[in-house]
Image (cartoon, rainbow, N blue to C red):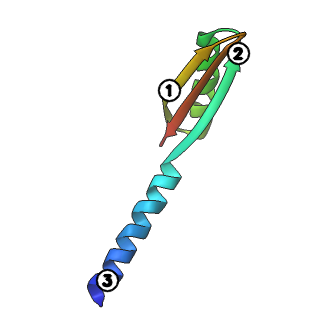
Amino acid sequence: MKSIKNTVAVTALILVSFGSFAQSVTASASTLDSAEAKIAAQAHKAGASYKITGARVDNGAYVSAELIK
């Protein structure tokens, strides 16, 4: 019974930690550099680093990233 409680507690902590450390953000601008600068500003405001997960250029530049605390 004690091991089941421990397993449930560890699983809950793992799920909470993943949810609290990763956050997806997006930005758009006229150039990729300025869109990335917006992502960097969002990360700085959140006190996090970031990892770009996608980017595209159509009539503007669009960047998506994951904030990592």
Q: Amino acid at mark 2?
A: Ala
Residue 4 marker:
3
Residue 52, labelled with which disc?
1
Which residue is drawn at the image coordinates 71% and 9% (left, top)?
30
Residue 39 — which label?
Answer: none
Crowd tier of the residue under label 2, counting other residues whose Cα lies within 10 Å: few below 14, some 14–19, many 20 or above: some
Give how far across and how far down residue 18 sits, in percent.
Answer: 45, 53
Q: Residue at x 32, y 75 (%)?
A: 7
Secondary structure at numbered mark 1: strand
Counting other residues with Cα less than 10 Å from the Cα at mark 3, is it few (<14), some (14-19), or many (20 or more)?
Answer: few
Choose the circle earlier in sequence order: 3 or 2: 3
Which residue is labeled 2 in the image?
Answer: 29
Distance CA(mark 2)–CA(mark 1) = 15 Å
Q: Is residue 55 left or right of residue 5?
A: right
Residue 48 vs residue 58, the one in the foreground: 58
Image position of 13 (left or right of 4): right
Above or below residue 31? Residue 11 is below
Where is residue 48 shown, x and y percent of the image? 51, 37
Q: Position of residue 28 (x, y in %)?
A: 69, 20
